[in-house]
């Protein structure tokens, strides 16, 4: 029997003591936990989007469940940056452009004009699209959000939709919107659907091992949206600090070791996840706020409150 030896070609880009992920499926093969919330109105969807944005790295850290890659235990706990690089289709020239991120990345901006001062990292936009939207009465900050989507090329176009015969179908926009994978996605109502409203998709969480854990994260986040709306909660912080929090969330055991930027009582400080979730001397905490909301609701029975 002949034994064939494998010839290993040296790749100069492969570093020592690194896990070599040699295919985009290393990222696309990751499972995740995503939740979409339908808002009561356009204004509520913008408010929810802006308040959920600072929670993206917090929930990423809380759900961190991806420390093993190709059978090796790594020094990162989350999938987000891995899939961000795996889905990066920028050309060499595009990578030289300032602040042009992978199409799979943290959301680059707040949407409400009142929060535009927190968009402290510039991001590229299609100025023609922005100008047209402003002409039609769309607020500037939201116009820049959609203008940013249109700097990308679509990855897939179905032949039957290539040349639309009328303007009653929003396929091309939805196609482009769905192929930019930020931590949050604003989803306008489709033109040809009267049932769907304005929605916000929350996308950063790692999936958990059990249905119970996944349900706990989803229900907790759903209740947080009710707290945001009912109490007018404002936890916005600059985009640069959100990006720093996103990177911290990947660090090993960040849930106990790292401090994250968080706003409460109109001041921003660095807090451990335990303090953000359960509270400390200066901040009530997200879980106590949820409990407060539940116990103040008259339409929730005692058994449900204790679930």
Image (cartoon, rainbow, N blue to C red):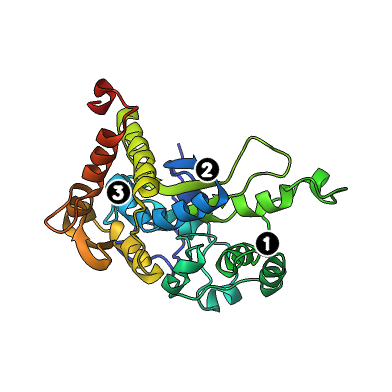
Figure disc tally? 3
**Horizontal and vertical percent position of residue 91:** 60, 70
Per the image, label 2 sits on a secondary structure element best described as loop
Task: Give the CA distance from mark 3 to mark 2.
Answer: 38 Å
Task: Give the CA distance from mark 3 to mark 1.
Answer: 32 Å
Characterize the local packing of mark 3: few (<14), some (14-19) or many (20 or more) Cα atoms within 10 angstroms.
some
- Which image quadrant for residue 183? bottom left
Of mark 3 and mark 1, the one earlier in the sequence is 3
47 to 99, vertically: above or below: above
Q: Residue at x 46, y 46 (%)?
A: 4
Per the image, label 1 sits on a secondary structure element best described as loop
Of mark 1 and mark 2, the one earlier in the sequence is 2
Q: Residue at x 38, y 54 (%)?
A: 56
Q: Can you identify the residue that label 1 sits on?
A: 153
Q: Can you identify the residue that label 2 sits on?
A: 40
298 to 81, vertically: above or below: above
Characterize the local packing of mark 2: few (<14), some (14-19) or many (20 or more) Cα atoms within 10 angstroms.
few
Q: Can you identify the residue that label 3 sits on?
A: 67
Of mark 3 and mark 2, the one earlier in the sequence is 2
Of the two numbered discs 3 and 1 in the rendering, the one whose residue sits closer to the viewer: 1
């Amino acid at each position: 029997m002949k034994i064939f030896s494998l010839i290993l070609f040296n790749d100069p880009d492969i570093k020592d003591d690194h896990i070599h992920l040699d295919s985009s499926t290393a990222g696309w093969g990751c499972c995740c936990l995503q939740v979409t919330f339908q808002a009561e109105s356009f204004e509520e969807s913008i408010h929810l989007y802006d308040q959920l944005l600072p929670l993206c790295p917090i929930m990423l850290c809380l759900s961190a469940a991806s420390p093993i890659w190709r059978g090796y235990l790594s020094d990162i706990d989350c999938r987000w940056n891995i899939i961000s690089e795996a889905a990066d289709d920028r050309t060499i020239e595009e990578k030289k452009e300032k602040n042009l991120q992978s199409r799979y990345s943290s959301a680059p901006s707040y949407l409400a004009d009142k929060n535009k001062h927190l968009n402290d990292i510039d991001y590229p936009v299609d100025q023609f699209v922005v100008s047209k939207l402003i002409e039609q009465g769309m607020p500037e900050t939201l116009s820049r959000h959609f203008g940013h989507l249109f700097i990308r090329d679509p990855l897939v176009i179905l032949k039957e939709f290539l040349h639309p015969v009328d303007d009653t179908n929003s396929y091309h926009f939805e196609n482009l919107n769905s192929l930019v994978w930020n931590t949050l996605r604003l989803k306008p109502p489709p033109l040809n659907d009267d049932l769907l409203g304005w929605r916000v998709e929350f996308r950063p969480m790692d999936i958990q091992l059990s249905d119970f854990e996944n349900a706990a994260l989803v229900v907790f986040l759903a209740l947080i949206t009710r707290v945001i709306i009912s109490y007018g909660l404002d936890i916005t912080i600059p985009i640069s600090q959100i990006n720093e929090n996103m990177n911290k969330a990947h660090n090993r055991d960040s849930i106990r070791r790292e401090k994250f930027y968080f706003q409460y009582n109109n001041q921003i400080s660095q807090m451990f996840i335990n303090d953000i979730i359960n509270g400390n001397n200066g901040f009530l905490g997200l879980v106590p706020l949820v409990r407060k909301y539940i116990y103040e609701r008259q339409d929730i029975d005692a058994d449900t409150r204790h679930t």
